Amino acid sequence: MRLSVDLVSTIAKGRNLIALDETIVKANRKRYCVYAAIDVVKNELILRSVCILRETGS
């Protein structure tokens, strides 16, 4: 739930224009999901997060 807490603090700071990015990266036979949120007006990184994607059985 870290993402929701960070976005709540972002709204409290009065940010109006935010860009979100989600990228899938493969390394060492694993897949990772990298998230980033950027304040476009201030050119400031608000959030970055990385998680390991689980393999599906199919």
Image (cartoon, rainbow, N blue to C red):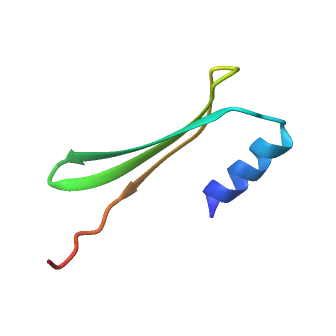
Compared to residue 56, the image places residue 13 above or below, namely: above
Residue shown at 75%/34% (left/top)?
A: 16
Quadrant assignment, res 51: bottom left
Which is nearer the eye, 10 or 17? 17
| Residue 48 x/y as whole percent | 53, 41
- Please state the horizontal and vertical placement of residue 43, each as a whole percent of the image: 63, 20
Residue lying at the far front in this picture: please name it: 17
Task: State left or right for residue 52 relative to residue 21.
Answer: left
Q: Position of residue 28 (x, y in %)?
A: 16, 49
Which quarter shows the C terminus? Answer: bottom left
Which residue shows up at 37% across the image and 51% down it? 33
- Foreground pick, 15 / 9: 15
Q: Residue at x 25, y 54 (%)?
A: 31
The percent coordinates of residue 6 (x first, y second) are 69, 49
Quarter holding the N terminus?
Answer: bottom right
User: Which residue of the protein is positioned furthest toward the bottom in this rendering?
Assistant: 57
- The number of discs equals 0
